[in-house]
Image: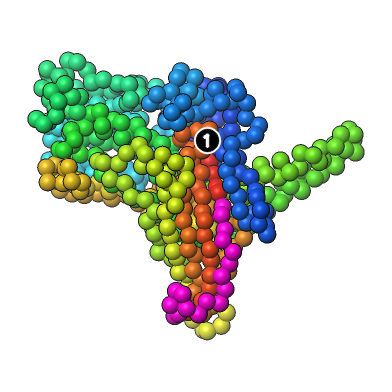
Amino acid sequence: MNSPTRVKVARTSKSSLVSLICVIVRLSSARAFATVQFQGGKSPLNQIKMSSSTSSTAGDAAFSNKSPTNNIPTFDGDEKAKATDFANYFCAYSQLYHQKQMLTDHNRMAAYHSAICGNADLFKDKIVMDVGTGSGILAVWAAQAGARRVYAVEYTDMAKHARRVVEANGVGHIVTVIQGAVEDITLPKSDWDQLGLAPEPNDSPSSTRVVDIILSEWMGYFLLRESMLDSLVRARDTFLKPTTGIMMPSHATMLLAPIFDEEERRAQHNEYAAAMEDWKEFAQTTQNVYGVDMTVLENDFDREQKEYYVLSSRWAELGTGCLLAAPCVVKELDMHVCTVEDARGVGLALGQDEGSGAPFDFDIEGRRHEDGHGMAGSSVSGFAGWFTVDFKSRTDDNGRDVAPQVPNPAYLSTGPEMGYTHWGQQVFHLPAAIPVLADQTTRIQGTMEMMRTKESARLYNVRYRFTSSRRKAGSGRDEGILMKGEPMELVYQIP
């Protein structure tokens, strides 16, 4: 049922609640996100820019969640970085509660089950690797589909549970659970002779690229959050046969659309306003009762609350009625050829933290009620981002005509049309809504950039640069212009 109201909204990430019960003590007090500061313009929210927090200390930097080369710590980080990464990221995935959350996402489960068990001929007698196996369910399906060997790679102690699941389902002789970061592991020496592991004829005889299929459920919020794609790319380059190997999923797409979500947008701003009123009362009480003036900190507190309530994206389960225009594609990935550079963000220049951005251009029609009275439209409350993945045959030049075909393609969407998925959509509410008027077309045109935060290689900020305009309905895009707003620049953190 198409409803313009959201079913559920939350500010917390899919692992944050579980992280509260982790026994690992967080080793870093560094802020997880880049600090957003306000600059210039008619309104303090007219333009903002990112900078690293001025309160960071040398100790914070020592425990930042990235390596010295700005990679995820499992790739080339030192022991401090890896420990921080485990506490901040991997810890949650060692909890059965968190695994259950993913295993009860039936859209997710159905897509992977169809991709694996619906293509048993593709898996028959193949060497398979499951990167980030978690509970081991994908590895079990691969074995049931006929794989000769499945390497189930898991960094956390969830590997112990995966071994039990594998044995309980009678595939322990096929699935080998390997605990460790996929960047560090090696395949068991005994398998090289026992299974006759061998690279492709044109590859080096000493190559480790002997895997036929790599499975992984690597996707984070708005696809890239958590940066597991980095590990997947390195696993592919290390273990997958370059021309005949198959990646599942094979392709990924990021989408963006303008939305109507005023109830929630206003609720955010009311929470922000309430927080500031509470601060004023606190400052007054502290002055009157204890004789200490705390108003000097009000601007810093205000900045923190804006970041938290106004300039953070939120998880949502939107109805399709919330969409004001058809979504546009902001990034596409071919999993057989994409690079770590591709995983660093969206719309960025090579090797840089900014760029020209991924373009979007939306036309939103304002319509009257069927009786001709009043407005049937709404207003632009913000943007929503989500992703889709495909499980299909190779389309790249290296493998298109060489790799085996996927006879029964599968598909997974995390968009509003699918109902619940644990990924949901990421919603970026505007500081002020843009009205949509009857008999007029509102145009939102601009770019989106997504970049990693300065403190963590697993977290991202999103920058929108755009203008809005209105024209008479039915006019050409550059004709009949009635209003053109000032350029806007907004940066959000994805918590």
Percent position of residue 391, x then y: 25, 46
Query: Which quarter of the picture shows residue 119?
Result: top left
Instruction: Please state the extent of the stretch shown in magenta in the rendering.
Output: 474-490
Does residue 49 appear in this view?
yes
Of 366 and 144, which appears nearest the observer? 366
Query: Which quarter of the picture shows residue 351?
Result: top left
| Count of number-bearing discs | 1
Percent position of residue 325, x then y: 43, 65
Of 59 and 371, which appears nearest the observer? 59
Q: Residue at x 40, y 34 (%)?
A: 99
User: Does 112 appear above or below 416?
Assistant: above
User: Does 266 appear above or below 231?
Assistant: below
Residue 481 within the magenta-colored segment of the rendering: yes
Percent position of residue 165, x then y: 30, 27
Percent position of residue 370, x then y: 49, 81
Q: Is residue 193 left or right of residue 474?
A: left
Residue 221 within the magenta-colored segment of the rendering: no
Q: Amino acid at mark 1?
A: Lys
User: Does 471 appear above or below 184?
Assistant: below
Q: Is residue 115 left or right of residue 289?
A: left
Which structural element holds mark 1? loop
Of 170 and 230, which appears nearest the observer? 230
Residue lying farthest to the top in this orientation = 190
Does residue 2 appear in this view?
no
Residue lying farthest to the bottom in this orientation = 372
Q: What is the crowding at mark 1: few (fewer than 14 residues within 10 Å), some, or many (at least 20)?
A: many
Quadrant of the drawing holding the N terminus: bottom left
Mark 1 highlights which residue? 454
Of 162 and 468, which appears nearest the observer? 468
Q: Residue at x 71, y 40 (%)?
A: 300
Q: Residue at x 90, y 38 (%)?
A: 288
